[in-house]
Image (cartoon, rainbow, N blue to C red):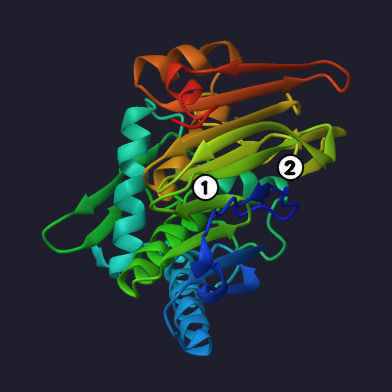
Amino acid sequence: MENLKSYKIIFFIFCFFLTSCTQTNSYNISGNAFGAIYYININTKKDIDINSIKENINYIINSINNSASNYTNESEISRFNQSSSKSFQTISSNLYNIISKAQIVSDLTNGYFDITTGDINIKKGFYKNPIQLKKNKFRDFNYKDLIISNSNQAIKKKFTNINIDLSGIAKGYAVDLIYDYLAKENIDKFTINIGGEIKIYSPKEFVVIGIDDPTNEQQYIEEVFIKNMSLASSGTYQNTIIFDNKEISHIVNPKTLKNVSNLNLLVTVIHKECAKADALATGLLAMNSNDIISFSNKHEIATLLVISNGTIIKKYYSKEFINYLSEK
């Protein structure tokens, strides 16, 4: 999620090198992206131009931000949201890819992940500098009313008041693009973390990632062992506001159009693609908590559900997630 109150995931990288260890160079890159902080750790025996790599990473981040950010009126998606046109509009490759992946996850989750709920959070004050929403009494649409033209790389909306919010997938998509770039540079091993959306390239060793305890940021609630995979989490407690004298989450249930009021939930998803892990974590969190694990089992999604009431913490695992609780 493009959250303002980002949570911290502590990750430990266990590397075992022999005498060649002294020849391995380690680099750390960090910065701001999508309202969060990003960290990238690179380990390589190659001679690399780390400044050039950082410039290229920032270029990737800025290009996605210019396409998909709801925090600036000048972004491509903000211009589309403000447009009254119901005709097809040609869009960039980044925006097309993000929306296409979002629609796949929307179909998979039966609409619980829905990028057309942006107006709900804007009206309730989740964005610092929101665009001016069009006044319209009619609000009966969902992600299926955003039409994609695959042949023309274009999108259109059936209703002028549709407002797209890509904060539930954009960070994960950025992680995927940075991963692809570093892989093409033949980097030996690296970890990418943008606001808790993580992707690992580690061809030999497992990487152990600690997932934060929702009740205590100084400790983690679970460890998972992954390599060449992505991990994304979403929590109802992470980005909240007071609305009508009640604290509510940024997560919107697209079926009821209400923000999730249970602020004690955390969902973590492990997936090959970080964009899909990001979107799935958001979509699953919008479901009834009793349905999350059964849905994940049915669709073979590696999911961890954490429910906390402040003192008692309960953890629930899908069958696929259990595979990552130890080295294999």
Q: Residue at x 52, y 59 (%)?
A: 17
Q: Residue at x 50, y 21 (%)?
A: 322
Q: Which of the pair 226/272 is nearer the observer?
A: 226
Q: Residue 116: x and y, percent? A: 45, 44
Q: Residue at x 72, y 62 (%)?
A: 128
Whether residue 143 is visible here, answered yes or no, is yes
Snapshot quadrant of residue 183: bottom left
Q: Which of the pair 218/89 is nearer the observer?
A: 218
Q: CA distance from mark 2 to mark 1?
A: 13 Å
Which residue matches tag 1? 168
Looking at the rendered structure, the kind of residue marked 1 is Gly
Q: Residue at x 49, y 44 (%)?
A: 206
Kindly check if marks 2 and 1 are in contact, taking CB atoms under 8 A apart as contact.
no
**Please, is residue 43 above or below residue 8 in the view?**
below
Q: Residue 12: x and y, percent? A: 65, 49
Q: Residue 117: x and y, percent? A: 51, 42
Q: Residue 304: x and y, percent? A: 57, 25
Q: Which of the pair 94/43 is nearer the observer?
A: 43
Whether residue 165 is visible here, answered yes or no, is no
Quick one: label 1, few (<14), some, or many (20+) residues within 10 Å?
many
Total number of numbered labels?
A: 2
Q: Please, what secondary structure does the residue beneath circle 2 have?
A: loop
